[in-house]
Image (cartoon, rainbow, N blue to C red):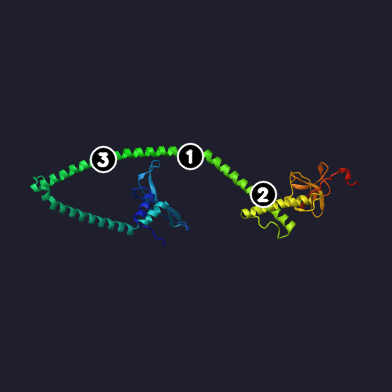
Amino acid sequence: MHDIDTSPAALRALAEAATPGPWQVVTYRTPFSITRHDGTTCSGEHVGRDIATVRHHPQSHAPYPIVTLGIGVTQETPVHFVFIRPEDADYLAAVSPEVVLALLDTIDALRASLAAAEKERDALRLAMRPAMSDKHKPAPAAVEGDIEHWKRWSDTNAATAHRLADYAKTLEVRLDELVAERDSIKALYEAGVSAWQPVYEILLGEKATAEARAEKAEAERDAARKVIAWANNSLYGSHGFFLSLDGGPANEHHLDNGIEELKDIVRRKFSNGTAMIWHPIETAPKDGTPIDLWAGERIANCTWNAPSACWDERIGTGYGGKHWAVMSAPTHWMPLPAAPTNPEDAPHA
């Protein structure tokens, strides 16, 4: 069984959704006559009762139907059909006799409480009537003294209130001055920010440029250290001349001396025009200088092809040769041999 919410809020919502009243019961009589299967006839009168509004519809000039009854006659037993709006059905189901009686009990209890309160009010009025009748009599001397006291106190407080009002106005003026000063300082600050913003951006750009140059210098330094370490190991073995590449002034002096000696050794080794040392490919020049490469075999007269980003064997003024397709992965390089001191002494084929 479905429980119906009969709280005041629910009943109010159901009543507002139902067809507005007032409602009435409309009684009507309908005569009928039927013929039985055996040929005899039966007639009578059906009394129907509908629930409708007292007010009439402006177009049909008839009451609004709330609950209407339809009748279908089959042989001797009439069939009744009831028509009702869902909202009206919900309302009628909610206002059952139990609900109406409970509401009436509540109303009676409230009326009894109201009557008791009115009775108590009347009793208090009777008790206060003598005091009310004496309110226009002259006040005793003690009361007059109290009145004078409170009058002076009121005058004093009025003066104090005026002084406080004047002080409040002074504070409001000072507040306006402080607000104006704050706005002025804020405007100066914003103007200063606008003026220094371009300078700040320039400084940021210079900082970024300096950092990029520092990174580039560190990369060049690391590459130089790799070359020096390779040369050190090639010339002197793992316990070579360059004992340290980092450290204080002593190490830097030691490094400078080692570099100068390395230059002398290289000049002596290449003084006869023949390169005797293979270098790592990472140190090869890429400025168009012809060099020899090693890629499983010696490939002479090669240069760096910048547009193609690869090594090419150079023939005449162009590029080509049988090693054209394998120049992308050489491992070592060396400078080209020097030209003969006297071209006439060069060997002839």
Mark 1 vs mark 2: give the one in front.
2
Cβ–Cβ under 8 Å for marks 1 and 2 = no
Measure how far apart labels 1 and 2 are at the Cα level: 39 Å
Which one is in front, 291 or 65?
A: 291
Which one is in front, 44 or 111?
A: 111
In the image, is residue 212 above or below residue 238? above
In the image, is residue 259 above or below residue 197? below
Residue underneath mark 1: 193
Q: Residue furthest bottom?
A: 1
Measure how far apart labels 3 and 1 are at the Cα level: 42 Å
The x, y position of residue 338, in whole percent, is: 81, 46
**Element on which disc 2 rests:** helix
Q: Residues within 10 Å of mark 2 (few under 14, many from 20)?
A: few
Q: Residues within 10 Å of mark 1 (few under 14, many from 20)?
A: few
Cβ–Cβ under 8 Å for marks 2 and 3 = no
Q: Is residue 175 left or right of residue 201?
A: left
**Element on which disc 1 rests:** helix
Which one is in front, 295 or 28?
A: 295
Label located before the other in sequence (3 or 1): 3
Q: Is residue 135 left or right of residue 111?
A: left
Q: Residue furthest right?
A: 349
Q: Which mark is residue 220?
A: 2
Label located before the other in sequence (2 or 3): 3
Q: Can residue 49 be seen in this snapshot?
A: no
Label 2 amino acid? Glu
Residue beneath the point at 33% across and 59% down: 98
Residue beneath the point at 33% across and 58% down: 99
Mark 3 vs mark 1: give the one in front.
1
